[in-house]
Structures are given as structure tokens and as C-alpha cells.
Amino acid sequence: MNLSRNLLLAYQSFGVVYGDLSTSPLYVYTSTFKGKLKDHHDEETIFGVFSLIFWTITLIPLLKYVFIILSANDNGEGGTFALYSLLCRHAKFNLLPNQQAADEELSSYKYGPSSQTGASSPLKMFLEKHKRLRTVLLVVVLFGACMVIGDGVLSPAISVLASVSGLKVTITKFNNGELVLLACVILVGMFALQHCGTHRIAFMFAPIVIIWLLSIFIIGIYNTVLWNPKIVFAISPHYIIQFFIKTGTEGWISLGGILLCITGAEAMFADLGHFTATSIRLAFAAVIYPCLVMQYMGQAAFLSKNLNSIQNSFYDSIPEPVFWPVFVIATLAAIVGSQASITATFSIIKQCHALDCFPRVKVVHTSKHMFGQIYIPEINWILMVLTLAVTIGFQDTTLIGNAYGLACMTVMFVTTFLMALVIVFVWQKSFVIAALFLLFFWVIEAVYLSAAFLKVHQGGWVPLVLSFFFLVVMYVWHYGIRRKYKYDLHNKVSLKWLLGLGPSLGIVRVPGIGLIYSELATGIPAIFTHFVTNLPAFHKVLVFVCVKSVPVPHVSPEERFLIGRACPRPFRMYRCIVRYGYKDIKRDDGEFENHLIQSIMEFIQMEAVEPQFSSSDSSSFDVRMAVIGTRSLESTPTLIASEQDDVDIDESIPSSRSITLRRLQSTIDDENPQVRKRRVRFQVPNNPGLDNAVKEEILDLIQAKEAGIAYIMGHSYVKARKSSSFLKKIVIDMGYSFLRKNCRGPAVALNIPHISLIEVGMIYYV
């Protein structure tokens, strides 16, 4: 991407990524000195606190995230699940066994060095061999994701409450109840704006953050020069040593407040899908870092000469003539600051959902140009309710800060661990380098994390409770999906039995195409025999469709479809695997049916000329699959696209659809003009060298398309076996069943037209 594009994205990132990090000066010094450090209000202690803040910002956001972590992005996507998907592609850590060898040929699948050095390292073999360790790895990733969701609840509460607290020092002197009410009104309005999308919000919010940063930068310089220029020397780590010598245990406990200076730093990585690594680096290194350092320095210089202002350090340090303009911009910046964690929450939920670790929810893509910019209505309103509950329940930024600091540091702790694994398995660097990285940052983060855990009883329990709840939801859903998939895998229909029935399958083959949806990428699903044994009739053409997510951020349209045969040619049974990445948009453009028919036609012609598809060995049907791109319908000579109704079909292809059905379809189209689809007229390719059997098969496919398409999908009821343990019965019969009944249905998630849907009820005893 060129420089101008990166500069534009860097500008937008101020309104989405950095709002939270840039509003930390509102409450860091107040939270640090409230509690155990109340007996150490002196210049030397303040110098030590500033030195700690400076080196914390330098080592974690700048060194760790900007220079190292951002380089581990998964084709432009960030967050804990992006690291996990990288690991799953380079080692067999995935617990859902639906990956195929063809997935590894995807252009976005390859990452890092092409050499396979260390591919069979003892550590990798050890982790792949023990399923429990892979389960532990997944739980760690889910726990980190849950803490990001906790950030999405706590960040808006502390940012907005801290900004309006400036009204305490005005002449009016608002009380706590009035401040909380004002904060709640602002929060409701902020969550109501989320449907506008990151793109619009970024353009609205970015100028606010830039003005805010310039304001705190200038105020920081003013306070440094006016009150105590010697604060510049506090950059030396010598002051940190003196701080701990003087304060001892009290200084260690106060780290729970100091770590708030880096809250929001994880959004740089989690929100990476909305921007680029270069734009994030530009914005932080050139603007955010110097502005924050200058503000913390100026605030420390002011406090060193005004020890009585520690309880309201930020607003007291503002020169009186500019108090109200800064207060207004601080309140607006706090609203923007909340946007970073909310956006990160949407991103992490989308990734969890794509990797079968979260129930199906409605995902709205708010930008046509940036795939990562999304909005999730259900999650947005859940976050709003939880944020209001935290704001009303605590009414104190210090208590919320204890919870927020614990959540942020836990996410960073998990990210460091996953990054160390990426260094070994993905970057294929020495184990020593990964160990040094892990040891260096874990020592720093463990010190802060231990201080944060000491405040669990003072508000720190909130992210733990929230994370536990979301972790249970995620793991129960993933466990249920896994058990259901294994049931399907072990109850596949025997191909030998199917071949014994003959091409007619021993039933009536009615005109039309039946799309049988299944999670199986290979084999004939049990739903097929369940349907046939109850209704002894099936469509003339059958396509087993598997829509699955691949652990890559994006699958190009040219690699979307895998097409193959499920049975020999006379059976007219095909398999189609539709692959999506965890960033992909599953648009309902009304062209899926046409793209599917086009792809099968191309496969039939490809099979006739390419020798690897000519084998008659029935055992290798699922292996012989071809990648067919979803090109534009007008780009192939075998198709003619036109805006026509069903009655205006090519006369050379007789339609088996009855007049009554055509009239019914016409009535539905007239009543629902917004869902009216483009009619595509198919023709048999006019190729003299084409085999007659191929022409006949393509003609059958076109006739079946004109007769109509039905979507057959299983309506599953998953239950635990009677011999199962009590815990498993609770998880499956209560937990998973409740989530399945209350999330979006698979037909809605896959945009299947209701009028063409046939659901087959099945009970899965897992």
C-alpha cells in the first residue's frame, strides 16, 4: 500500500485505536496514589512514578507491540485468534478435524519462511500428540479473547466517568449521583452510534483525538517548564530503583494503578484488521508516544509542587483559562476512547464465531473496502447493559481501574505466550530467541499482573466473572460443535452400500436439484439416508454442500469452491465445499445458485480432458476435487445472463417446472420485489470436440436447474448418551441445547431462502 493510503488509515486509527490509550492521563496518577501510597506524597515518589510510567509505555506498547507483535499479523489481521490461526496452520493444534490437504494450497495459507526447518521439532510433536495440551492451548486463547470482551465493558465505563469527574472541581460541584447519571446518558448515546460503522465513526472521531493529543502535549510542556523542569531527569531508571527502596511493598501494590497508562495498547493489535500495521506504527511512534510522555511528564512536574492536587491531578494541572475547552474535548475524547475496545470486541467475536468458538450472531459489515470493519448488534447491546451496570454499581474510577488493569494485563500476558509459540512454529526461529522474548516480557507483565491480582476484592473480580461466563459459553459451544461433527463423521453412509443401490438409489428421482447441507467435507452424511428412508423420492441432481471456515483471514473468490463427485457419473451426485476465511463477508448477493451450477459445469468439462479425474476408482471420489473460482457469470462462454422471468427460458431446454409452480413463483416475486433475483439462462456449450456423455450430463444439470432448487438441511437435536457422565449431560443437554435454540439458525446464517428450505429432524446421541 502506498504512503498516502497509510497516512489516511493512520489518521482514521486515531478515532478507533488510540482513543483509549490517549485518555489514560485522566486517571493514572489518581489511581496510583490512592491507597497504599497515600503516605508517600512527596517529590521523590512522584519522580519514581513518572519514571515507571515512561519505561512501561516504552517497553510494552512501543517495543513489544509496535516493533514485534504487529509483525506477527495474519495477512493483516490481529488479535489472539489471529495468532492461534497461524499456529493451527503450522502445527496440528486445531481440535476440529475438518481441514483438508487442499486448504493448504490456498494462497493466503502460506506464511513465514518456506523452509520446513524445525517442522518436526520435539516441542511440536509433543503438543500435537497430546490432545489435552491442545485443549489447554484453546482454553488459554479463549480466556484471552474473553478478557478482550471484558475490556469492551470496562473501558467505556472508566473513560467516560473519569472525563465527567472534572465537574467536581467547578463552581457548581456536581455530586457523584449526578456525574453517574451524566456518564450513563453519554454511554447510551455512544453505543447507539455503533451501527454507523468504524469507517464513519473514525472520520468523526479522529479530529477529536488529534485535538485532544495536541492539547495534552502543549499542557504537558507548559507544566514542565512552569513547575519543575528537573522532571526530565526522571527518565533515568535510577528513579525506579529509588522508588522501590523507599516505598517497598506499597510501591509494588501501586503498580496496579501505574499499569493503567498502557490500557488500550492491546487494541493496536486487536483492531489491526481495520487498518494496516504500517499505519498503526506511524500513528503511535510519530504522535501518540511523544504526546503521552510529555503529558505524564508535565502532570508529574505539576504534582511535585502541588502535592494536595493528587486526588484530581489532571484537571487541577490544567491552566484555568483553558479549563472548559479542555474539559469538553476530554469528555469527547473519552467517548472516542471507548470505541477502541468496543471495536476490538466485535473483531474478536467475529473470529471466534468463524472458528466455531461462539454461537451464531448477526455480523454486519459496515465497509465495502475494509473487510475487518464490522458491527454486531446483539453484542453491542449486551456490552451496553454490562457497562451501565458497572458504572452504576461502582461509581468510582479507582475501583473500575482495578478491574480494567487486570483485564488488560491478562490479555497482554496471553498475547506474549502465543507470540513466543509463533516465533518458534511460524517464524521458525531458535527456541532460545522465543524463550528470551517470553522471559523478558513475562517478568515485566507478571510483576504488574501480581499487583493487579491483589485488588481482586476491590473491583478486580469483575473481569474474572465476565471472562468465566464468556469462556463457558465459548467452550460449551465449541465442545458441542466438535461432538456433533464427530457423530456425523462416525455415522457416514457407506459408499459401497450407496453404489449397490444403483444410479436410481432405489427411489424415485424427481426433477430438480437438491442441495444437501452438511458439515462433512468428505463422505455421505447420515441426514441423506434419514431423508430417503422417510420420503422415498429425491431430486435428479444431488449436491452435497459443505460451508466451512478455514484458519485464514480471507479466501479469494478464485479459490472459493472445491468441486468433485460423490458417486460415479450416472448417479448425478456432486460435492461442493465452500471455503471462507474468518474475515470474509458471506454476502447474500443472490448468485450462489448460479455460481454453483457454473462451477459444476466447469468441473464436468475439466474432468473430461484432465487425466487425473478420469479414474473409475470409486474409493477416490472425495480425493479428486478441483478448485473452481467464482468468476463473473458473464466471463464464461458457456453461460448467457439476462434479466428474465422463469417463463422466458431457452426453448431448446424443456422445463419440467409445472405451470402452477411458475405462477406461484411469479406471485411471490411480485409481492417481494426487493428479493427478485436475476434470471440466468444456461446453454450447453457449442464445442464439437465435447464428448456426448459430457453434453448429456450438462444438459441434465441445466434441466434440473430450470426445474427448481431445494435446500435440504438437518434440524439437529443434540443429546448426551445415557451412559455419559453427569457433567457431560449438563454441558450437552442444558448448555449447548440452550445456546443452539437461542442463536441464529444455520439457514439464516447461510442466507438460505425460506421458501426453498426443507429441514430434516435428527437426534444426535453424542
Image: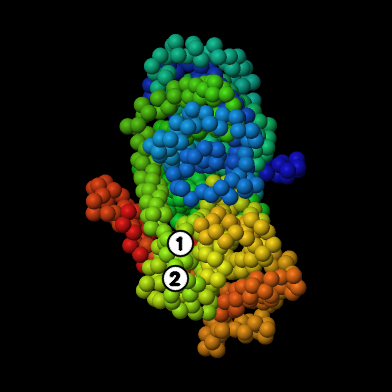
* Residue 150 in the figure: left or right of residue 617: left
* Front residue of 637 and 585: 637
* Front residue of 621 and 259: 621
Q: Is residue 113 visible?
A: yes
**In which quadrant of the rendered image does the N terminus lie?**
top right
The residue at 64%/66% (across/down) is 604
Q: Is residue 690 above or below residue 520?
A: below
Secondary structure at numbered mark 1: helix
At label 1, the amino acid type is Leu
Local crowd size for mark 2, using a 10 Å CA cut-off: few (<14), some (14–19), many (≥20): few
* Residue 6 in the figure: left or right of residue 249: right
* Front residue of 63 and 286: 63
At label 2, the amino acid type is Leu
Secondary structure at numbered mark 2: helix
The residue at 45%/33% (across/down) is 127
Residue under label 2: 501
Q: Is residue 202 visible?
A: no
Residue under label 1: 495
Q: Is residue 638 above or below residue 478?
A: below
The residue at 62%/41% (across/down) is 110
| Of callouts 1 and 2, the N-terminal one | 1
Residue at mark 1 to residue at mark 2: CA–CA distance: 10 Å
- The picture quadrant where one finds residue 270 is top right
* Front residue of 720 and 488: 488
How far across and how far down the image is residue 24, in percent? 52, 33
Mark identifier at residue 267: none
Local crowd size for mark 1, using a 10 Å CA cut-off: few (<14), some (14–19), many (≥20): some
How far across and how far down the image is residue 704, in percent? 57, 76
* Residue 620 in the figure: left or right of residue 741: right
How far across and how far down the image is residue 272, in percent? 60, 42
